[in-house]
Amino acid sequence: MTATMTMEQIDSRRSFAFRPLISALMALVALYATATVEADLIELKSGHRIDGDVLKEHPDAILVDIGIEVIRIPRSAIQSRSKSDGTAPAEIGDNDQKLYRVASLPRKSIRELAERFGEGVVLIQTPGGLGSGFLLNKDGYAVTNQHVIEKETRISATVFSRSTTGEFRRRRIDDVRIVALNPYFDLALLQIPVQEDLPFQPVYLAADSDLKDGDEVFAIGNPLGLERSVSQGIVSTRNRNYEGMVYIQTTTQINPGNSGGPLFNARGEVVGVTNMKLLFAEGLGFAIPVAYLKLFLDNHEAFAYDRNNPNSGHRYLDAPRKQAATTTATP
C-alpha cells in the first residue's frame, strides 16, 4: 500500500533534512567570523598597520593574506605582531597636531610590552653624566628630566633598534638640540636628529590619569649605565606631595640613570616620568605624573630654550619685599 503524505509532512521532512546543512553553514559563518576577528595585526616600523592572515613564514619575510591579495612583508620592516581581537591600539584625539601620541592600548604581559616599546627608550649622555629619555614622535622629539641636562649643552642620545634576529643594536647620535626646559616640573624637551636609515619608534602617553593605588607599573631605563633595564612594581600612592609637587610613588626600582625614563602602566602607556628616589631606602621611587608632562608639552613655547640666555627656560623671581622704614637719630 502506498503511503500518502500531506504537504505539512513533506515540509516537516524537508525542514529536518535541511537542519544539518543549516548547522554546517552556521558553523562555517561562526568560523569565518572568528577567523576575521582573530586575524593577525602587523604594525610596521613606518607606522602603518596591516590586518590579515599569515599564510606562511620565511626566515626573512612573511606572506599575509589581506583578503584581496597576498603580500610579502620583510621581517626587517615589522615592528610588532599581535592578534586583531578588537583590542588593537586606537589612537585618541588629533595626534597630528601635537608632539605626542595618545592611544588606548590592550593589556599585555610586561615581557611583551617591554619588547614592543623598548626601542622608544633612549640613553641621554652629557659630559657630566647620563640619564634616560623616551621618544614622543618620529621627528625625534624626546623627553627627559631637566636635571639630567642641567647646565649642559653638549648632549648625545643612544637609540636602540631591533635587528631581524631580534637583538638590539645601539647607535649614538650627537648634536641633540634642547627645545624647552621646565625647572619647576623637572622636565626637558629635546630633539634628536632624524636618521634616514633608522626610523624612530615613539611611545604612547596615557589618555588620562586613571591610576589607582596598587596598579601594576614598570620602568625602562639605564640605571648606572646598565642599558635597557626593566624593573617592575606597583603604585604605592598616586598623589604623594613633595615640595609643592604631586608625584606618583612606586615600588618600581629607580636608580641614578633611570632619571627621565618612562613609567608605563600594564597597557604600555606612559603614566609618568621617573625622576628620583629616596636615598638609603628601597622601593621608594617617584615619577612625575603624565598630566604635568602633557601640560609642559602643550605649552613648551613658554619654556623655550635660548642658547644665548643661560637662564632659559625663563624662571621669574619673586618681587622684592617692601622693607620696613628705619628711623635715624638726628644730631
Image (cartoon, helix red, strand yellow):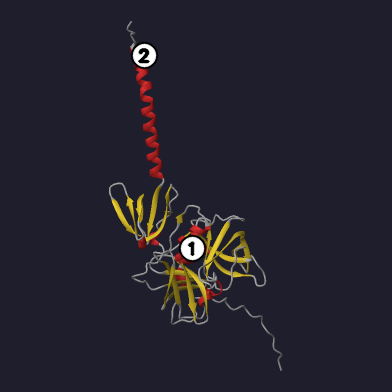
The C terminus sits in image quarter: bottom right
Q: Looking at the image, is mark 1 or mark 2 nearer the viewer?
A: 2
User: Which amino acid lies under the numbered mark 2 shown in the image of this protein?
Assistant: Gln
Q: Residue furthest front?
A: 1
Tell me: 19 left or right of 113: left
Q: Residue furthest left?
A: 69
Tell me: 4 left or right of 286: left
Q: Position of residue 214 (x, y in %)?
A: 61, 55
Q: Position of residue 237 (x, y in %)?
A: 62, 59
Q: Which residue is mark 2?
A: 9
Q: Is residue 113 visible?
A: yes
**In front here: 63 or 242?**
63
Q: Position of residue 161 (x, y in %)?
A: 42, 67
Q: Which residue is mark 1?
A: 294
Q: CA distance from mark 1 to mark 2?
A: 72 Å
Q: Is residue 268 visible?
A: no
Q: Residue furthest bottom?
A: 331
Instruction: Determine the residue positioned at 62% across, 78% down.
Output: 322
**In front here: 163 or 80?**
163
Specify few, some or many for label 1: CA neighbours under 10 Å numbering under 14, 14-19, or 20 or more.
some
